[in-house]
Amino acid sequence: MRALVLGGTGWAGRAVVEHLLEGGAEVTCLARGESGTVPEGARLVRADRLSPGAYKAVHGEWDEVIELSHELDLVEPALDALADAAAHWTLVSTASVYARNDEPGADETADVVEPTDLSKYADAKVAAERSSAARLGSRLLIGRPGLIVGPGDPSDRFGYWPARLSGTGPVLTPTTSGRFVQVIDVADLAAWIGQAARAGHSGVVNAVGESVALADFLRTVASVTGFNGELVEVEDSELLAHAVRYWAGPRSLPLWLPLSDAAFAQRSSCAFSRTGGRVRPLGATARSVLEDERARSLDRVRRSGLSASEERAVLRQVRRRTSR
């Protein structure tokens, strides 16, 4: 299989390329190369995709083209240059395209946002999906991953918990009742993309793993790390009052979602399984992430999560209030 990856030097893109190579594909990556180089065995064509003639060096027939971008000014020129000669095309989209997050078990037929503001990630992905579908028809597979996790994840969302639960308690958490975690290991996503490309699958697929209760997620991670301290569950209103943020970013409790959006982590994975998708046990991902977190330093500054001092301050304030 001759595969062209539009990208391939970033974290998830490299994983896709590595899997394609392991499967015996001849892989070319078109990228600026600013995020790094490509895995050994792949060919890198350096190009700025916004420049005229960016696709000149990769014109020709491809068994598979994989598009990782969400920006229309990158997606549409690629379609113009390459779609006619591509036997199969995979667009890596996102589960964030859905308009509602209050429908547990919702599948790919659920309504998506209207792309009225292309500066928003979800809107831009919907626009990319629609442009790709109009041009490619039955040759297009749209994968909508949920939260992608694994060693090297630059967002630090999943990794915060193995790192934090490697230490001592007490550990601040949101209330767990009615909350879920749904992730896909980057290696499992890459394996599915490669397998689906070889099989020629088309349509729209939620590339998501098993939905796990937040309490079970924390127990699994604690088992992996050997944590036996106290988990202090705090109500949303109080966390917000102490300027703790949802989901991701500085001063956040990663993976914490409002209860009104709990179904974001409860998407149907039936189509993913039907098209060959397989996911490793959550504990296996947690172990590999823990090893990576230790290699990168458990005490490093993170893009997501509470610092040790921030967590201690919130816990002091919470306990001061409850002791009155």
Image (spheres, rainbow, N blue to C red):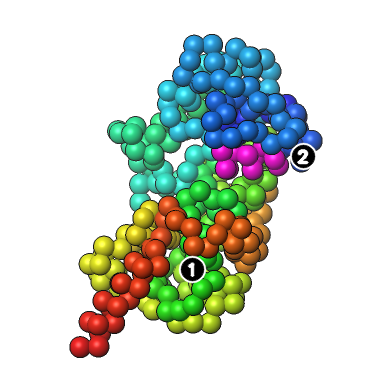
| Percent position of residue 170, x then y | 42, 79
In magenta, the rendered stretch is: 10-19
Answer above or below: position of 232 versus 7: below
Residue at the far left in the pictured view: 324
Disc 1: CA contacts within 10 A as few (<14), some (14-19) or many (>=20): many
Could you say which disc has been placed on residue 132 in the image?
A: none
Answer above or below: position of 197 versus 190: above
Task: Please tell me whether mark 1 or mark 2 is closer to you in this view.
Answer: 1
| Percent position of residue 221, x then y | 56, 70
Q: Is residue 260 visible?
A: no
Tell whether 193 sits left or right of 248.
right
Residue ID for mark 2: 23
- 151 and 211: which is toward the camera: 151
Query: Residue type at mark 2?
Result: Gly
Q: Residue at x 48, y 58 (%)?
A: 300
Residue ID for mark 1: 164
| Percent position of residue 228, x then y | 53, 82
Residue at the far bottom in the pictured view: 324
Quadrant of residue 127 within the rendered picture:
top left
**Could you tell me how far apart the alpha carbons at marks 1 and 2 are, in whole angstroms?**
36 Å
Q: Residue at x 36, y 68 (%)?
A: 309
Magenta segment: does it hold 11?
yes
Helix or strand or loop: what does disc 2 sit on?
loop
Question: Quadrant of the image for the N terminus?
Answer: top right
Tell whether 115 sits left or right of 45.
left
Q: Residue at x 63, y 61 (%)?
A: 291
N-terminal-most mark, 1 or 2: 2
Query: Residue type at mark 1?
Result: Arg
Question: Quadrant of the image for the C terminus?
Answer: bottom left
